Amino acid sequence: MKQLCVLLLLFAVGFTAVAGTDCWTYTPPPAGKTQGTLSWTDSSGFENVVQGIKIVSGTDKKLYIYERTNGGNANALNLDFSVGIEDGYELIEFQGSVFSGNTYVTNFVAPSSLVRIPRYAFNGCSALVHVEFNDGLETIGEHAFDTCSALSTIDNFLPSSVKFIDKNAFYKCTAITTDCVAAGVTNIASRAFEFASVPSFDFSAAPLDVIDELAFYEMPALTNVVLNQTLRSIGREAFRGCTALKTVSPLLPTGLRVFGSGNSGVFYGCTALEGDVLWPNSLTNIANRAFYQSKITTFTARGKDIVRFETHPLFSCTALTNIILSSSIATYGSALMDSCKGGSLERHVWFLGPPPEAFPSQFFSNTDKQFVTIHLPWSQQEAWREYAATASNATFTFNKTTKTLPEKIDDVGTWQSGVTQNVTWWKDFDQHFTITVR
C-alpha cells in the first residue's frame, strides 16, 4: 500500500499552484533486467516517469538514477522529489550526466537524501526553469547546470550545507533572478558562475577560502557581493567584466594572500565598482590592471609587508583621488597611475617612506599632471632630494609644509599590526614635502 505523501505546492514557471497528493512509485526492473522506473502523477495530471532507476542493495531501499538516461526521459517534466517515494524508498544519488541534454524537464526539487549533484547532471536542460536545493546537499558538480538558459528561480540557493561549487556549475545560466546567500561554501571553482545572471552574493557568514580564476567572469546582472574577512585567495579575472558590479564589501578581505596574478586583474573592467581600497597586511603583491576602469576613489596600501606592484595596477581609475603607499614597497611596475584622468579632480599620492628600489617609469602616463600632488615624509628628505636630482619623469619643487591625510583616510583606523605609528601620529605630527608634478 502507498504511504501518505506530503502535499505539493508548485511555484515553478509553467506550473499552476495547485496542491497535489501523489508521490513517486518505484517499479522494480522486469526479470533479467537491471533498471526500474520511478513514476508519479503531479497536480497538473501529468504522469512523470523516470527511467534508469537502480537499487543500491536489495535490503536498504536506497535508489539511484543510472547515468545514461538523458534523452530517454521525455516523460519526466516535473522532478519534484520532495513528495517522497512510497514504501520507504530513498533516492540518494544521481550519476553523472543523468539528465544532460534533456529538453523536457522544467522543474527539479532535490530529494532530502541527496548529498551531491554530479557533473553534467542537468547540463543543457534548456527547458528547466525552477530548481530547489535540499538542506544536506554538499557539492554541486562541474557543469551541473551548464547552459540551463531558462533557469530563473533557485530556491534555497545555496543551503549552508553546500561546501564546494565545482567549475562551470552555473555557466551561462543567463536567466537567474535569485539572490544567493551562501553560509557554508569554502571553495568556488573556476568559471563556476561565468556569464550567469545572479544579481548578488552574500558570503559574509561563510568559511569561504578560495575564489578561483574567472569564477564570476562577465556576470552582466551582478551588482553586489559581500565577502568574508577570512577569504585567502581570489584568482585572476575572478570578477572581470562585471560591468554592473557596484559594491564589493570588503573590497580586499583582511586575510587575503592571493589577489590575481600576472597581467590579469581581479576587477578588470568593473566600470561601476565604487569604494575605497584598504590593502591588507597579509597581501604582498598586486597584479597588473587589478582595478582597471573601476570607480574606486581611494587606494591605501600602508601594510608593513607589501613587496611589489605589477604594471598598470590602477590603470584608468578615473575617480581615484588619493593613493597612500607603504614604505615597504621595494619595486613598482611602470605606469602606476596610467590614464587616471578626467575632469579637474585633485589627485594626491602619499609615500610613507624613502624612494623604492625601483621607481616606476611613466608614473603618471596619460594623466592630467597639473592636478597631481605627491606628498613625502619630511624625515626622508635627503633620500628624496637625492632621487629628485636624477629624476626624469617629474619636476620636483620642495616646500616644507605640514600636511594631514584627508578625513576619509584617517577614518580607516590604526595601522596594520607590527607598525608602531597609528593614524593619530600621522595626522597630528608628521611633516611632509609637497611635490607638485608639472
Image (cartoon, rainbow, N blue to C red):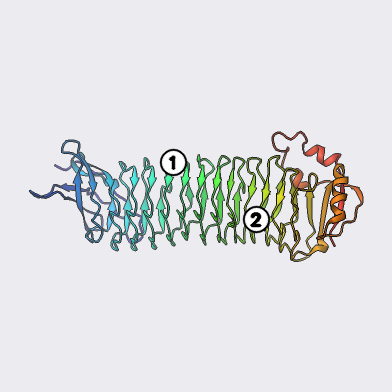
Mark 2 vs 1: CB contact within 8 A? no
Classed neighbour count for the residue bearing mark 1: other residues with Cα under 10 Å, few (<14), some (14–19), many (≥20): some
392, 25: nearer the viewer: 392
46, 289: nearer the viewer: 289
Helix or strand or loop: what does disc 1 sit on?
A: loop
Q: Which mark is residue 317?
A: none
What residue is rendered at 30% in x and 58% in y?
100
What percent of the width, then of the height, locates residue 178?
A: 46, 54
Q: Earlier in the sequence, mark 2 or mark 1?
A: 1
Q: Is residue 182 left or right of residue 53?
A: right
Classed neighbour count for the residue bearing mark 2: other residues with Cα under 10 Å, few (<14), some (14–19), many (≥20): some
Q: Amino acid at mark 1?
A: Ser
**Location of the C terminus (image quadrant):** bottom right
Helix or strand or loop: what does disc 2 sit on?
A: strand
Q: Is residue 366 left or right of residue 77?
A: right
Q: Is residue 238 left or right of residue 273?
A: left
Q: Amino acid at mark 2?
A: Glu
Q: How many marks?
A: 2
Q: Within the image, what quadrant is residue 60 found in? A: top left
238, 261: nearer the viewer: 261
What residue is rendered at 38% in x and 52% in y?
142
Residue, disc 2 = 274
What percent of the width, then of the height, locates residue 49?
A: 20, 55
Q: Which mark is residue 160?
A: 1
What percent of the width, then of the height, locates residue 72?
A: 21, 60
Q: CA separation, marks 2 and 1?
A: 29 Å
The residue lying furthest to the left in this view is: 31
**Image: 16 above or below 280:** below
**Location of the N terminus (image quadrant):** top left
